[in-house]
């Protein structure tokens, strides 16, 4: 059973546009929701993370929106750039826990 | 060298071979992880070590054998692997009790 469901599988966005990736979870014990960015040949790198006590977190062009009642969270990339082209993974865990549950990833391509 | 390093970066081995993957972290962390990344599947947590003791083993076949001699080093010993074990093997580290995991670049393993 997949603990975190991620969509879409792939996404193509024009430069300057908004990229939106969605994730949904079932386990209400999860209280930490990170997003990772992975470039080819590299390991995933932590991009931004949120805890359920806030509904939104913004860092530069990257924003996480969190809907606790719907058990959904999403990553918004504003003013998308070709350099943002990568695979993005959402994840969920319980605070201080060792078990991370990852989504299946979204391949983002930003075309000039 | 900083961050999390992994060697080798690429490995091709036959089903009867024995090989080892190495991970080293230079972040002062005390928890280390092995993940398996296959195409179009979520990252799969294989093993977790916290303070050099194994705390998670997610039903991984015995042909994978981890070793954590100290808080900076982690090994994954491989023997009699199957072709379906071909994947990217990622190492990560964190501080115990922290949610932020830092990944290495991975070892691309091909089993022939």
Image (tube, coloured by chain):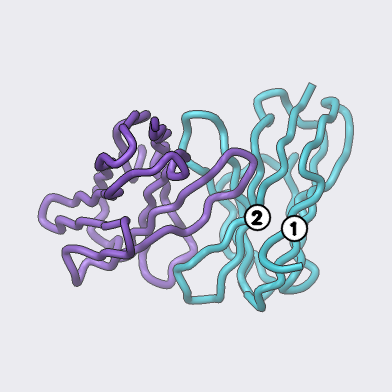
Chain colours: A purple, B cyan
Q: Which dot marks residue A93?
A: none
Same subunit, tags 2 and 1? yes
Say which of B70 and A48 sits in front. A48
In this picture, residue A77 sits left or right of residue A46: left
In this picture, residue B89 sits left or right of residue A7: right
- SS for tag 2? loop
Which quarter of the figure has residue B82?
A: top right
Assess disc 2: are there few (<14), some (14-19) or many (≥20) residues with their C-alpha within 10 Å of its C-alpha.
Answer: many
Distance of mark 2 from mark 1, alpha carbons?
A: 8 Å
Q: Counting residues from the N terminus, which is met first, the one under dot 2 or under dot 1?
A: 1
The quarter of the picture where the C terminus of chain A appears is top left
The residue sitting at 66% across, 78% down in the picture is B28
For disc 1, the chain is B
Say which of A74 and B63 sits in front. A74
Residue B69, above or below B103: below
**Tag 2 and tag 1, C-beta contact below 8 Å:** yes
- The percent coordinates of residue B18 (x first, y second) are 88, 38
Residue B46, above or below A106: below
- The percent coordinates of residue B15 (x first, y second) are 82, 26
Q: Which dot marks residue B23?
A: 1
- The percent coordinates of residue B93 (x first, y second) are 61, 65
The quarter of the picture where the N terminus of chain A appears is top left
- The percent coordinates of residue B23 (x first, y second) are 75, 58
Which quarter of the figure has residue A64?
A: bottom left
The residue sitting at 67% across, 66% down in the picture is B3
Reading the image, the residue beneath label 2 is: B104
Instruction: Specify the farthest residue to the left.
Output: A69
The residue sitting at 20% across, 49% down in the picture is A72
> Which mark lies nearer to you, 2 or 1?
2
């Amino acid at each position: 059973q997949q603990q975190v469901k991620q969509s879409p599988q792939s996404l193509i966005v024009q430069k300057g546009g908004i990229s939106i990736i969605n994730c949904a979870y079932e386990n209400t014990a999860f209280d930490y929701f990170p997003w990772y960015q992975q470039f080819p040949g590299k390991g995933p790198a932590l991009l931004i993370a949120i805890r359920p006590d806030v509904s939104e977190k913004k860092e530069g062009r990257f924003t996480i929106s969190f809907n606790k009642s719907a058990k959904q969270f999403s990553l918004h990339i504003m003013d998308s750039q070709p350099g943002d082209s990568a695979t993005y993974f959402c994840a969920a865990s319980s605070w201080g826990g060792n078990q991370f549950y990852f989504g299946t990833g979204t391949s983002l391509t930003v075309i000039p | 060298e900083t961050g999390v390093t992994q060697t080798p970066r690429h490995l091709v081995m036959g089903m009867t071979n024995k090989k080892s993957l190495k991970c080293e972290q230079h972040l002062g962390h005390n928890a280390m992880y092995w993940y398996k990344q296959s195409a179009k599947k979520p990252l799969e947590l294989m093993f977790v070590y916290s303070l050099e003791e194994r705390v998670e083993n997610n039903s991984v076949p015995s042909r994978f054998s981890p070793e954590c001699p100290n808080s900076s080093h982690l090994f994954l010993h491989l023997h009699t692997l199957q072709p379906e074990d071909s994947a990217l093997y990622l190492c990560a580290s964190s501080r115990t009790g922290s949610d932020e995991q830092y990944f290495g670049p991975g070892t691309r393993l091909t089993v022939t």
